[in-house]
Amino acid sequence: MSGRATIEDVAARSGVSTATVSRVLSGSVPARPETRDRVLAAARDLDYHPSSVARALKRRETRTMGLVVTDITNPFYSQLARAVESVAHEHGYGMVLANGGDDAARELEHLDLLLERRVDGIVIVSSRLTRRDAHRLRAIPVPVVLVNDTVTGSGILTVTTAHRHGARMATDHLILLGHRRIGHIGAPADQAASSQRRQGVRDAVRGAGLEDPVVALGDGGVAGGASATGALIDAGVTGIVAYNDLSAIGALRALHREGVRVPDDVSVVGFDDIDLAAWTDPPLTTVRQPTDDLGRWAVEHLVDRLGGATDPAGRPVSLEPRLVVRGSTGPAQGAV
Amino acid sequence: MSGRATIEDVAARSGVSTATVSRVLSGSVPARPETRDRVLAAARDLDYHPSSVARALKRRETRTMGLVVTDITNPFYSQLARAVESVAHEHGYGMVLANGGDDAARELEHLDLLLERRVDGIVIVSSRLTRRDAHRLRAIPVPVVLVNDTVTGSGILTVTTAHRHGARMATDHLILLGHRRIGHIGAPADQAASSQRRQGVRDAVRGAGLEDPVVALGDGGVAGGASATGALIDAGVTGIVAYNDLSAIGALRALHREGVRVPDDVSVVGFDDIDLAAWTDPPLTTVRQPTDDLGRWAVEHLVDRLGGATDPAGRPVSLEPRLVVRGSTGPAQGAV
DNA sequence: CTCTACCATGTAAACGATTACATCGGCAGA
DNA sequence: TCTGCCGATGTAATCGTTTACATGGTAGAG
């Protein structure tokens, strides 16, 4: 057999027209039981699987969505990707992955490729595009959902973790433990949510009447977290709120290397609650993002919209994170 | 505008036939400069992007490949996914991700979906399918490359890390450090490479004339690694070779909880060299898989084969891993 | 017995590109 | 001037489905 069986082969073998085959297979219109059986048998014999590309051309929908992610290697993103893929699958959608890579240009190129592939919708996760090329996002001719990121004043559906509030919870936790001098490991401005989380830390500190947090900039990864930590130690902080778990893990490592005990001397809080956060030494106190819910929300609203729903897409929907207390935080020295 | 611009719109606007538009855009056939310009201008004005689904139907290739992974959340897989996506992109291919999930049934379903989508080829990485449903793999009507896994006696292209040799290197390393009683944290038989790595450990131990390694079974994840460790400690091992880094991290955690010092009392070696392995406490000695090379090999051979190459696909190609020594291994107590 | 309705099925026109083949004007060589 | 060729472009078939519309047969109503 040179190619795969087509609907025509099935029609020929079962002695009916292609229209009937199509109808039987889709079940859209009842057929005479006998016909039905003949068609089904022929399809089985020929191992016929309809070509979704032909179907896509006719129906003008591919039942595929694109997922644009900055770095699939980052545990938070891969967990989100799993959620998105899984929910998409539930709804009969496939997922094509576009991994951002380093630069925004590449992300744009990926976007064009997705559109050429005629994906029905796109989920974009905390991309660089939202800052540099917001106008490009608005021009996308298919529904888009942004996760953990916003582009102001567009009608684009958005779901995000309450970063600011999450960071505030983390910081409040430290303050409640008696910490007075708080440090923050930030991420570059092109990282999603970077400024919101920083704000949250500041909110808490100010709310408690403490002096402003010491901020050191990381890169959103482990290495950056480690190297940012030195400055915080020097500044004499006893509590560190990291931009994310990776940064926090870097901090743990740096502190250990410097002989600073966690949590006895310094407490550390992360953000995300990636799988490995429970297994660091000590286990990481962190703010858990509702990753599965983010993914589900994104996909289901995309699907709704594809189904013709035309909700006004008002303000960004914000999902509450949850503080997960583990071993990396404890009472400040000399606290009550 | 209700829909997107089609080639016909461009043809109309530039006053030529669709054939000419197609030719100009693909550059396959030279056109008169003036025509060329008109077409290009029209395409730009209409923001025309050719539909790759129509093209796929005609050309009978989608320029898309499928990637089947067991769990995108596992760092090794996500690193591999990044490599695959990136190399595929280099060659003009898109990637649709099929995340296995728990059971093999789901993986089969995913496979069918990929085929319906008419992917040109499929990369399968250490799937459950190879054991249960090898016959299904052989029946796939597009080229397939298996990564880190084999199905015997099929003509399926295969590239794999030299698991057995890698595990042997890890174990030899411990033996060289004076360890005499070696433990191994294994993975269930349905995990790829599980038995080969176990064999490698045995090879080394036997080669050194030591008694057989103590084997405890994990689940390939952190939790399993942690719970398997107890039995190894009880058995009095001083060196542990884990199935992978996740298991090793679990072991580190369990040892720490038991007050066993690493590497002073017990040494631990992992496998994979995931990003975080360098950041554990102590940093993990591990066997680095050539992840990028695996991905590149897989994609490029797939592309070759799609291009008509018809290499005999003899034996599985095996890539050598590399021992990366960090802080989690050290001399055995009482060793010279 | 005729008419209407309806049910099961067939016919053929899309969907949006690519490409084999036909056409046509112009130019070089005889 | 005629022939032949070549380069640029147009015509139309094709890829594999879905689906609007047409058709033909059968049963129930009158």
Image: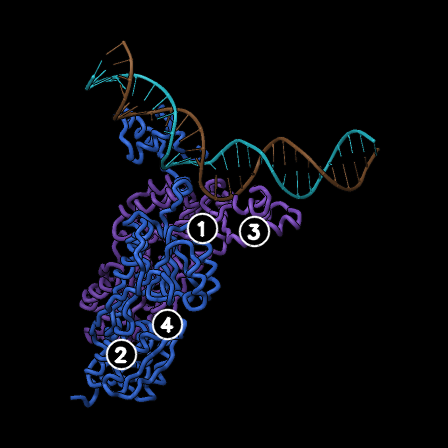
Chain colours: A purple, B blue, C cyan, D brown
Q: Residue B268: give its label.
A: 2
Check contact, mark 2 vs mark 1: CB within 8 A. Answer: no
Q: Are marks 3 and 4 on the same chain?
A: no
| Foreground residue among B149 and B99 | B149
Q: CA distance from mark 4 to mark 2?
A: 15 Å
Can residue A212 be seen here? The reply is no
Q: Chain of mark 1?
A: A
User: Amino acid type of disc 1?
Assistant: Met
Q: Secondary structure at mark 2?
A: strand
Identity of the amino acid at label 4?
Answer: Gly
Determine the CA span between mark 4 and mark 1: 44 Å
Residue A318 is situated, as x and y percent measured from the top left of the image, at: 42, 54
Q: Nearer the viewer, mark 2 or mark 1?
A: 1
Question: Mark 4: which secondary structure?
Answer: loop
Q: Which residue position is annotated with label 4? A: B221
In the rendering, which numbered label is found on residue A143?
A: none
For the residues labelled 3 and 2, the Cα–Cα distance comes to: 58 Å
A265 to the left or right of A166? left
**Percent position of residue A317, x then y:** 43, 52
Crowdedness near tag 1: few (<14), some (14–19) or many (≥20) residues, C-alpha within 10 Å:
few
First in residue order: circle 3 vs circle 1: 1
Instruction: Report whether mark 4 lies on the same chain as mark 2.
Output: yes
B307 in relation to B103, above or below: above
